[in-house]
Each structure stands twice: as structure tokens, then as C-alpha cells.
Image: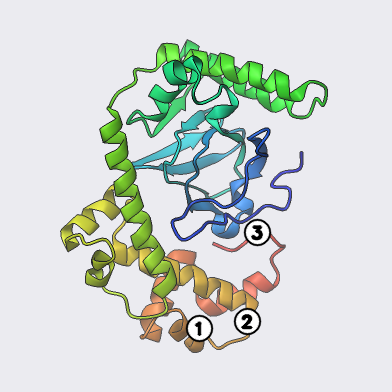
Amino acid sequence: MEINDGYTKIRTDETLRETIRHGSEEYPFRYYMEDIWLFDFHCIDWHWHSEVEFVFVEKGTAEFFIGSGRYVVNAGTGIFINTQVIHRFESTESTIIPNIVFSPSLLSHEESLLYQKYIQPLLDSSIECLIFSSDVPWQKEILNLLLDIFAVQDSGDLCEIKTIELLLKLWSILYENVRITGKLSEAQASARTQAQLQIMMQYIHKNYFHPVSLEEIAKTVTLSKNSVLNLFNKYLHTSPISYLVNYRLKHAAKLLVTTENKVSSIARDTGFENIGYFCRKFKEAFQVTPGEYRKLREHTPKGKEVQ
């Protein structure tokens, strides 16, 4: 499989739920071979999905933001991301991450004993993600199984049945070794919190070119300004206004490359009222001025954006 295979942008709906179908209704499983560096702005941006995901860092180093956690992950490490947990991956270099995304119902029907006894408890737990290291024997076994699953995808014959066989073995090891904490009510509360965060992020995405205040962001979910600040700091590790500014800068960078508009015009169109402030923040984010960014990108191969 080719790296990224032409897939370099995460597409989501208004709640940040990923809209791409992972596999088919008959076989809800998909294998991806991706390089984070080749995605827009060198990141697989915020999204979530009802499927679970297993990621292996084959090469490079990535920063993973998953639920309320932040993890710097090096080559040889694996990650499990639970269902409906918001996440984002970013890198500062080429970082190869083969990964699989699949519906837990692939392992067993949702009304079956197998699903309710061994699968549902983990899905309903407060576990947002798990990190796998080769230093821990059972986690090393998980990593080896992931590599076997990746290899099967290119084998052709009996691919589906071999994949499910390996997934069941992998899940069995998870169930035996992971201490499932939290109750369903806690998981539901976490889901509500993430939904509120998604609503606020989407408000920013839709209104970034207008003046946007913290108070306006808070009103979208009927929370206090302090609660909103805490929510952004916990899950996104930044403030709402910093998130807004960075979102504006990303759009400004795109306009610098895709249009011939003046820098001052692009600043206004992306919500910056002060051109000096825009240029200062742009250089902080990309290490070059807007004009330099435009010139450099004219001579940069596709997929290698300047940082």
C-alpha cells in the first residue's frame, strides 16, 4: 500500500466526527499506511469516530493529543484509541504510522455474549487510550500482533478471516491485562464534555473571520468562561483564543499559497484587524513572515509545506 494513498486531509462534520467510511457495512475494517508529515499543516487534525483505532509508530516521532491527554510517541510504540474519543496527531518530521480503524462489531454481534462480556466493558470504560511499549511483555505481544495484521492486509488470500482471527487474539490480550476503570456514567459524562468542546470548536471554525470573544464561545454551550478555559486547557492544551488565532493562521497560510491577494487583505479576511499583530503571530507559528512563506511555498514540492 502506498503511503497516504492520496489521502492528506481529515474530513469531518459539524461535530468533528470523521465522515469517511472505514471499510464497508459488511466488513467495517480499514488499514491505512500514513505519514503525518504529508497531511495539511503536518497534522491529522481533530476528529473522532465510533470505531476503535490502533496505531503503530513505524518511523519518526509524533505528538498525540487524545481525549484529555498529550503523548509524545517514538518509533516502535503503539496506541489504542477508544470509540468516540477526540484526537489529533502532529509531527515535525516524516512520521510513518500504519494504523487500523474498525467497528468493534466486527469481532462479534453487539447482542452476543462475547460482545457484552469482553468488548462492551472496555468501550464503556473511562479509558480514552492505551500506550503499548515493547518493554512490557504483553504489550510487546500486542505490537507483534499489530504488525501481523498489517502484513495480512497485503497478502490477499483469506485476508479477512486472518485479520479477524488476529484481532480477536489481540482483544483477548487487552481484556486479560487492562484494568477496566470507570463506570458507564463516567464515560457518558466524558462524551458530553467532548461534545461541548466540539460545539465550541465548530463555532470558531464557522466564525473565525469575524471578531469572536470568549463570552460568545461560552454561550454556545451555556458554560461559564472559566469552565470553557478549563475545558480547552484539559483537552486541547491551549486557550480558546489561542486556538482561534492558530485556526486563523492556518487559513491565512492556505490563502497565501492559493491566492494572489495582498497580505493585508488576507489578514482581514481571516479575522485579524491589526496587520502588525497578524505578521508577528504568523512568524511565531511558521518561523517566516507571510511574504517569505508565500515565496518559499512557490518552490516547495507538494506535500512539503513550510513550517
Q: What's under tag 1, amino acid-wise?
A: Ile
Q: Give the amino acid at mark 2.
A: Thr
Q: Quadrant of the N terminus?
A: top right
Foreground tag (3 vs 2): 2
**Depth check, front residue: 211 or 20:** 20
- The residue under the point 49% across, 31% down is 79
Q: Whole-percent x and y of residue 105?
A: 55, 28
Residue, x 32% and y 31% (percent of image)? 126
Q: Earlier in the sequence, mark 1 or mark 3?
A: 1
Residue 94, x across and y down, in percent: 62, 46
**Residue, x 22% and y 53% (percent of image)?**
230
Residue at numbered disc 3: 304
Q: Earlier in the sequence, mark 1 or mark 2?
A: 2
10 Å crowding of disc 1: few (<14), some (14-19), many (20+): many
The residue tagged with tag 2: helix, strand or loop? loop
Q: Is residue 280 above or below residue 107?
A: below
